[in-house]
Amino acid sequence: MENSRLRGFCGIYAIRRIGTNDCSIGYSGNIPRRWGEHRRKLRRNKHSNPYLQNAWNKYGEDAFEFIVLEECSHNEAFLMLAEADWMEKTGHSLNPRQYYPDLSPRDLSALEAMRKAYRLEIEAESSADLDGKHGS
């Protein structure tokens, strides 16, 4: 149903320059709305990511695609963890201070602990999926 898609869904997304691995990864509780915000800012030359803005200006709107990487829970902490995981998977060097500069050292430690638990949970789910597919 296309209408349910228009109302929005949450998860992790990438704005990628077609034919390259150059991308910007983000998360949102409403991906279609967030993509609209990105497009408006990029078209007006007002985007907060100067690298993305410069590439958009240089190569043009048609050189980019908006991709859903993962649909997931509306829990913001979970979305932050999933975003961090995708940044690592796609080769972004994740420096939590760069992406979350307002985190206190305590919050940064908590985020790292949550990311570790998140990865273990994902690995366990993947392992269970493989066991189920191969049967016993």
Image (cartoon, helix red, strand yellow):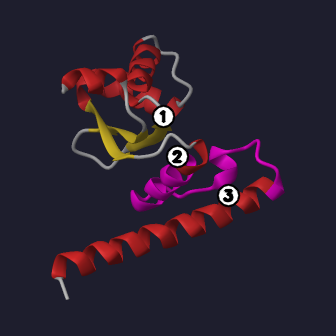
Q: What x and y, as percent, mark residue 106?
A: 82, 58
Q: Is residue 95 above or below residue 118?
A: above
Q: Is residue 99 magenta?
A: yes
Label 3, label 1: how far apart the Cα atoms are: 18 Å
Q: Do the residues bearing badges 3 and 1 touch, measured as CB atoms within 8 Å?
A: no
Label 2, label 3: how far apart the Cα atoms are: 12 Å
Q: What x and y, as percent, mark residue 32?
A: 36, 25
Label 1, label 2: how far apart the Cα atoms are: 8 Å
How packed mark 3 is, by other alpha carbons closer than 10 Å (few <14, some 14-19, many 20 or more), is: some
Q: Do the residues bearing badges 1 and 2 touch, measured as CB atoms within 8 Å?
A: yes
- The part of the image, by quadrant, that contains residue 71 is top left
- Seen as rendered, the residue at the extreme front is 136
| Residue found at x 39% / y 14% | 43
Mark 1 or mark 2: name the one nearer the start of the chain.
1
* 113 displayed left or right of 18: right
| Residue found at x 41% / y 61% | 89
- Seen as rendered, the residue at the extreme bottom is 136
Labelled disc at residue 111: 3
Q: Is residue 88 above or below residue 80?
A: below
Residue denoted by label 2? 79
Mark 3 or mark 1: name the one nearer the start of the chain.
1
Q: Dot 1: what SS?
A: strand
* Amino acid beneath label 1: Ser
The quadrant of the image that shows the C terminus is bottom left
Mark 2 or mark 3: name the one nearer the start of the chain.
2
* 129 displayed left or right of 52: left
Q: What x and y, as percent, mark residue 52?
A: 44, 32
Q: What x and y, as percent, mark residue 21?
A: 32, 50
Labelled disc at residue 101: none
Q: Dot 2: what SS?
A: helix
* Segment colored magenta: 80-106
Residue denoted by label 1? 28
